[in-house]
Amino acid sequence: MLSDQQSARVHRRILALAFIVSAMPLSAATLVVGPGAALTRVADAARLARDGDTVLIQPGTYLGDVAVWPQKSLEIRGVGARPVLDAGGTVAAGKAIWVFSDGRFKVSNIAFRGARAADHNGAGIRFERGRLEVSDCLFEDNEHGILTANFVDAELRVVDSVFRDAPRNTRALHHLLYVGRIARLAVEGSRFHGGYQGHLLKSRARRNDIRYNLLVDGPAGHASYELEFPEGGVAAVVGNVIGQGADSANPTLLAYGAEGSHWPENRLLMAHNTLISEGWRPALFARVWGDRLPADTRVVARNNLTVGVGMFTLALPGWHRGNHALPPGTLDPARLDFTLTTDSLLRGRVERVEETTLRPVAEFRFPIGTRPLVEPARWAPGAFQRAEAVLAREPSP
């Protein structure tokens, strides 16, 4: 026989389990959207889906098929060849092709194209609150690829995706990825190119992890900054190729703190990046507005490689080691060749970074994605340790 105390404890556990079960969805469904499916429009799936469901979108072009997703948890995947959400110049709720209001969402294998809004802030995705993970997606010809709101508990993760081809107009600044004052941004294995007057990636997030990406504007690009953190915060920039084209109107590649400081902790940590300027005038490979930031702001640059005419660590506050420079034309951005030769004199001229936040564990892999970094016997500066080039003869997907 159970004692009264034991019986009460068992009863409480049963009630707790019943509460948990009652809070769970009765059953998760899979909704299929496509030309031959019961649902032919994505907007219908957004209306019918319930929390915990999965939405599968078949190949095809969905013209003007924009949607607001009101759910609290959802996974949306393209099936097979990447389906294209072509906004045709329209957006949902005056904001984006897809709007996520508040919840936990995963989106993969979708193309977002042609978003235009009355305020010139039309986005492929407008993410407002919760947690959003985007993988293997394409954003092109949108006023912003992804645009977030400013909820301080929101988190955005972008993996293995392409952002390209900002609209060619001067009515507003169009950033390929624009992140507001959220808790965290992580971007990995992704490619950004073809900006126009706006920035390739701009973030006001509290914490930023930008790792193993190709932020190279390319011959058709006219971006301003390639990477900007206007309000400081913690920014770990590791293992990226950051390249500015010859036609940029701004000599700065990476900007930090131009608008002062919003967050209590401010750190810019750069390690093993390759920074390239193809312009004729001297570049500022990185610029920190120290007079607008708190006195305890930390700036660290380790084992970075710059290519082209310009200044890097001489223009930066902080403590820096292992950074090296090469003259213009040493690498070949047109062929996406960013690697040092096996006999380069720079191999072995840097030290292994011991700080976990700064130590690279992967490298960008063309066309998108990453591959594990094989630790070399002699470390080299820059984003790549292997000698073989990251060559591409076709445009990214």
Image (tube, rainbow, N blue to C red):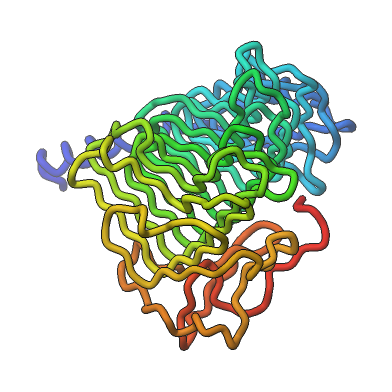
Decide if residue 28 is in sight here.
no
The location of residue 32, given as percent across then percent down, is 76, 34
**Count of number-bearing discs:** 0
**Above/below status of 70 relative to 397:** above
Residue drawn at point x = 41 percent, y = 63 percent: 271
Pick whichever, 384 or 299, lies toward us.
299
Pick whichever, 247 or 118, lies toward us.
247
Q: Quadrant of residue 343?
A: bottom right
Asked if residue 288 lies left or right of residue 81, the reply is left
Pick whichever, 69 or 299, lies toward us.
299
Q: Quadrant of residue 114?
A: top right
Asked if residue 37 lies left or right of residue 44, the reply is right
**Above/below status of 369 relative to 217:** below
Residue drawn at point x = 66 percent, y = 34 percent: 196
Residue drawn at point x = 10 percent, y = 40 percent: 5
Residue drawn at point x = 56 percent, y = 37 percent: 199
